[in-house]
Amino acid sequence: MNKGRLEAFSDGVLAIIITIMVLEIKVPHGHELSDLKPLIPIFLSYVLSFIYIGIYWNNHHHMLQTVKHVSGDVLWANLHLLFWLSLIPFVTGWLGENKFKAMPMALYGIILLMAALAYFLLQRRIIRNQGEGSLLKKAIGRDIKGKISPVVYLISIAMSFVSGWAAGAGYVLVALIWLIPDRRIERILKEE
Amino acid sequence: MNKGRLEAFSDGVLAIIITIMVLEIKVPHGHELSDLKPLIPIFLSYVLSFIYIGIYWNNHHHMLQTVKHVSGDVLWANLHLLFWLSLIPFVTGWLGENKFKAMPMALYGIILLMAALAYFLLQRRIIRNQGEGSLLKKAIGRDIKGKISPVVYLISIAMSFVSGWAAGAGYVLVALIWLIPDRRIERILKEE
Amino acid sequence: MNKGRLEAFSDGVLAIIITIMVLEIKVPHGHELSDLKPLIPIFLSYVLSFIYIGIYWNNHHHMLQTVKHVSGDVLWANLHLLFWLSLIPFVTGWLGENKFKAMPMALYGIILLMAALAYFLLQRRIIRNQGEGSLLKKAIGRDIKGKISPVVYLISIAMSFVSGWAAGAGYVLVALIWLIPDRRIERILKEE
Amino acid sequence: MNKGRLEAFSDGVLAIIITIMVLEIKVPHGHELSDLKPLIPIFLSYVLSFIYIGIYWNNHHHMLQTVKHVSGDVLWANLHLLFWLSLIPFVTGWLGENKFKAMPMALYGIILLMAALAYFLLQRRIIRNQGEGSLLKKAIGRDIKGKISPVVYLISIAMSFVSGWAAGAGYVLVALIWLIPDRRIERILKEE
């Protein structure tokens, strides 16, 4: 089985997810600057989710470059990842309408956590299929980012019920960890 | 005629179908956990439909790997399949808003039945075009799953008017039959 | 310039057009069979538009198989076609909500007419670019279907103000002309 | 890293952006010609934005034809461009509902300006990656259009608060500059 359609289908789903989120930013009826003000939290949650989907697309792209053939179990592990990512527009919308409230803040983190878990499972399945000397295994190395992220998600989910700001800071932090080019962050982490 | 665009177009339509269904899960205005409660049946019907579209994408992917060239009749048989699948977001939305009510439950099954029929017609057309020694014919073998599914759909449609739960169990059962890897289910079916 | 991205972008736009039309079939709140009744005209207009987009995708697919390289003017002629096709979900929705009323019926035909015109312009541009011995020119032959369609559209648009049914019959007729495999319809037209 | 998926993902996002904008043209309940009248500004802003997305797709297509391999920073510069373009449906909707009002008119220009800036950054990053003798650098030449556009945007944004019509004329002008085939406009600009 070649990987072409897996990539095409994933690209399609991710492109739609990233774009339909903008439909949550409802066009206001008024035409004053003040009419945009209630949209700010919705816009900010859109930006954060856009970056997250961008990170997933980027990582997915890199991961599949180490793969030549895909088996049935990889197709399903990939659909499992797309399922959790497909819920991001919903939690983004809920977050945007209820800025820094406990439950939306926590649910946002739970979906991110499930997506991270699904990504991890997909990664493991590909590594297992590649067998000894897996290219992907070498590429991810100790996978420090992949291990830190779920920990920060868990802390942020718990923090949601104490301080919405702290939880939000956690989600932004994980996004930044992935955005900063690999070598730099790894050097920083080594130095610590 | 090469099959590249047929795959690309089908991937596009399936990616959109699987993603726009999430728009049916309307963002609640409140921010309590209880505000999510009415969304549970909508979420469950989303999960079921997501799995069904995933199965169709998966099977479509496998089917087309046996194909080299596509003729005009295959293009239309494929569009016919996409037509019934395109109605799944609608019936999913209706089901989600009216949990276990007779008519939505039955209509969900009818659309699944029509999609299964369209898939069968597409399959037969490809086999006919491949002529003697058709690769697809060999690949599907006795096509036990393909024959059981419409029977379960028909029973579930009838059951919709007696017990919504029983009908739902039927739809879940068919999804499971397709999800479980082929060899295992075939061994189980042989043993019976 | 290669044609790969032109095809990919067109497939994407057509896949989205064909799928978002289903969003016009709003999920009813009730759960009785009678709640579906007002949706029948919306469903029928969806079916008709689905077939039209399918025909355009099919023809577009065939047309581009005669093409190797695309120039800037072809890209824009193609976008012009996609523009008119992108309005089909809107006119389909308007038609569905106002069954057989004069203006929606006429506007539906006008958009179909503009799309047919845009298709014709795209075709002519490709033929001109291919120069003498154009493969596309040979493939379309006398282009009888392409010449009949706008005439039927024009008659149907005029008929909209007399009888919605007659206009609708015209639109269905054109769809049928394109659906019936080429050789048969051409033989029929020859015999007349 | 090959550029295939970058193109596929961008095509997907642009195809969705260009198509979901049509959802802002809400189907009217009435069936008279007069019911379409309030939709005219929405339709006009749709046409303008359709052309802009078409121009971006076209330019993006050309730009990437000079590229063989893409690095991580190009992926993110590309996502940055897609981010600003993804806001076009929102500003188009706001503009359409508030024809020629100052704030929507200005915001439309701001988003266009940000997209132009993001395009410029993407272009510069590709040129830097290509190093000496960059093919893209040669292709864009003095990039007169690319330099004029942000100036016109800035003037139009300022004009929004004086005359909506003047601002709109500015946005139409930039679109025309890009629509007219390169050689002609360059000759015109030379002659001045």
Image: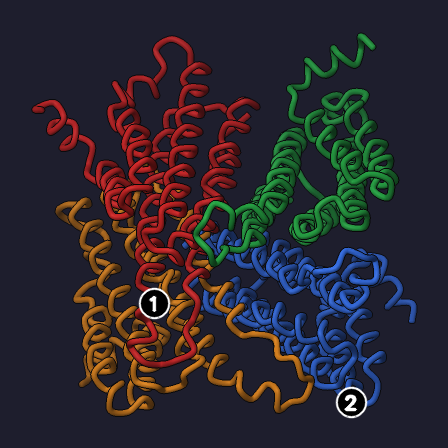
Chain colours: A red, B green, C blue, D orange
The image quadrant where one finds the N terminus of chain B is top right
Q: Kindly indicate the quadrant of the structure image that contains residue C154.
A: bottom right
- A5 sits to left or right of A60: right
Residue beneath disc 1: A38
Residue B145 showing in the rendered view: yes
Q: Which residue lies at the image location 44% right of the left edge and 79% below the top edge?
A: D96
Chain letter of the residue beneath label 1 in the structure image: A
Q: Is residue D34 found left or right of A74 in the rendered image?
A: right
How much space separates mark 1 and mark 2, taking CA atoms? 46 Å
Q: Nearer the viewer, residue B63 or D93?
A: D93
User: A91 and D70: which one is in front?
Assistant: A91
Q: For the C terminus of chain B, give its image quadrant.
A: top right
Residue A97's place in the image compared with B188, above or below, is: below
Q: Is residue B152 above or below residue D10?
A: above
Farthest residue to the right: give it: C191
Q: Nearer the viewer, mark 1 or mark 2?
A: 1
Residue B99, x across and y down, in percent: 70, 46
> Which chain hosts label 2?
C
Percent x, y of residue B91? 71, 51
Residue D151 percent coordinates (x, y) = 19, 76
| Badge 1 amino acid | Pro
Q: Does B20 sit above or below residue B56?
A: below
Which residue sits at x=29%, y=33%? Answer: A155
In the picture, the disc for residue C161 is 2
**Residue found at the far left of this picture:** A191
Q: Position of residue A31 (x, y in %)?
A: 36, 81
Q: Secondary structure at mark 1?
A: helix
Task: Bin the neighbour count of mark 1 within 10 Å (Cα to Cα): few under 14, some 14-19, many 20 and up.
Answer: few
Label placed on residue B183: none
Total count of labels: 2
Q: Can residue B121 be seen?
A: no
